[in-house]
Image: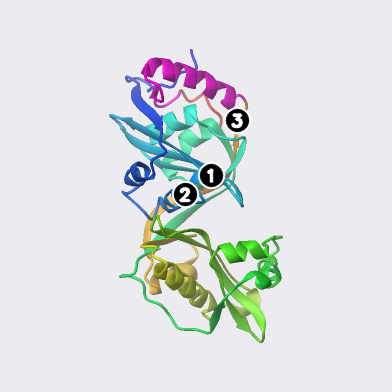
Amino acid sequence: MTDALYHAGAEPARFVLREQRDPHIVEAALAEDRGYAAYALGHLEPGLLERARFWLADGAEGHGVLLHARGALGRTVCVVGAPAAVEALLALHPGPIDSYLSTAAPEHLPALRRTYALSHMTQMQRMATSAVAFRPVAGDVRRLVGRDARALNLLYASDGAPTGYGPEHLERAVYFGAFEAGRLAAAAGTHVVAPHAGVAVVGNVFTHPQFRGLGLAERVTSAVTSELLERGCSTVALTVNPTNTPAVRAYTRLGYRPGAFVIEARVRRRDLAGARAAWRRWRARRAAGTPGIEAISAGRRPPDQGGHA
């Protein structure tokens, strides 16, 4: 058997792929669920767009979008769309050896596992709000700035994980903190701030174990969300463990609404995936016969091909 992808017992699904540099076209391809696609949409922002590459796949079985990006926090991959389209995209463009999967749907797992070994995988849920839905709460919080970096690192380290946030990170992102007896007791920040793209992602919400149950996380999340909406981000999303009932309730009180389930994981490209992708790209470009276009047939591989993490 060849390395070609195919449907078991059916004709292959044919997809046409193109790297897309027009942010308006990419935004339209991601418009169906802005909360789910928030990370990808955020990379349309000037300053992030230059460090991102988008590929689009179109075929009779659906559409897909693939993002590979590099930034201050490392390399990121996001996949959006029909599973067969995502498989076609990853078959040709697996990206760097190591990356962080910040957005994938559970139904993308078979295609992801053919290309990557996955570790530290979690299933989370996106929640999102808007200016109309948001319900802020009052509280004594303040914006964190560069000089607060040491206090923020100490707060996050109280959970046992080392952190290394610098002053430049706090100045570039949006972080708010709540203080108790002069000590930083809770904080919330952002993963993506993209007002030109109209989207932002809240993250790194954390309360020191000694101060939990006081509503501090809700206050700082409210302050960050208010700031993002004021900056023109019409969609503000976050990711939560759906089993974390207190967090889900707090975000719901703020006007966040549950959305799609997402997979996050560390990914490492499987051995030979890069070489096989280069060969597939050569064949796909010959099959398309048009510069800048790739054509590939993709679907389910036999059970004995492509291992699982």
- Whether residues under marks 3 and 1 lie with C-beta atoms below 8 angstroms apart, the answer is no
CA separation in Å, label 1 and label 2: 8 Å
For the point 40% across and 36% down, which residue is it? Answer: 20
For residue 245, side relative to residue 181 (left or right): left
Q: Position of residue 39 (x, y in %)?
A: 46, 51
First along the sequence among labels 1 and 2 = 2
User: Can you say whether 22 is above or below 290 in the image?
Assistant: below
User: Can you say whether 207 is above or below 180 in the image?
Assistant: above
Q: Position of residue 268 (x, y in %)?
A: 61, 37
The magenta region covers: 272-301
Give the crowd class for mark 3: few <14, some 14-19, many >=20 residues within 10 Å: some
Residue assigned mark 1:
51
In the picture, the quarter occupied by the C terminus is top right
Which element is circle 1 on? helix
First along the sequence among labels 3 and 2 = 2
Residue assigned mark 3:
270
Extreme residue toward the left, this view = 60
For the point 50% across and 43% down, which residue is it? Answer: 52
Residue type of the residue flagged with mark 2: His
User: Can you say whether 234 is above or below 111 in the image?
Assistant: below
User: Can you say whether 47 is above or below 117 in the image?
Assistant: below
Which element is circle 3 on? loop
Asked if the magenta segment contains residue 287, the reply would be yes
For the point 45% across and 24% down, which residue is it? Answer: 301
Residue type of the residue flagged with mark 3: Arg
CA separation in Å, label 3 and label 1: 24 Å
Whether residue 213 can be seen here: no
Residue assigned mark 2:
43
- Whether residues under marks 1 and 2 lie with C-beta atoms below 8 angstroms apart, the answer is yes
For the point 64% across and 62% down, which residue is it? Answer: 168
Q: Position of residue 10 (x, y in %)?
A: 32, 20
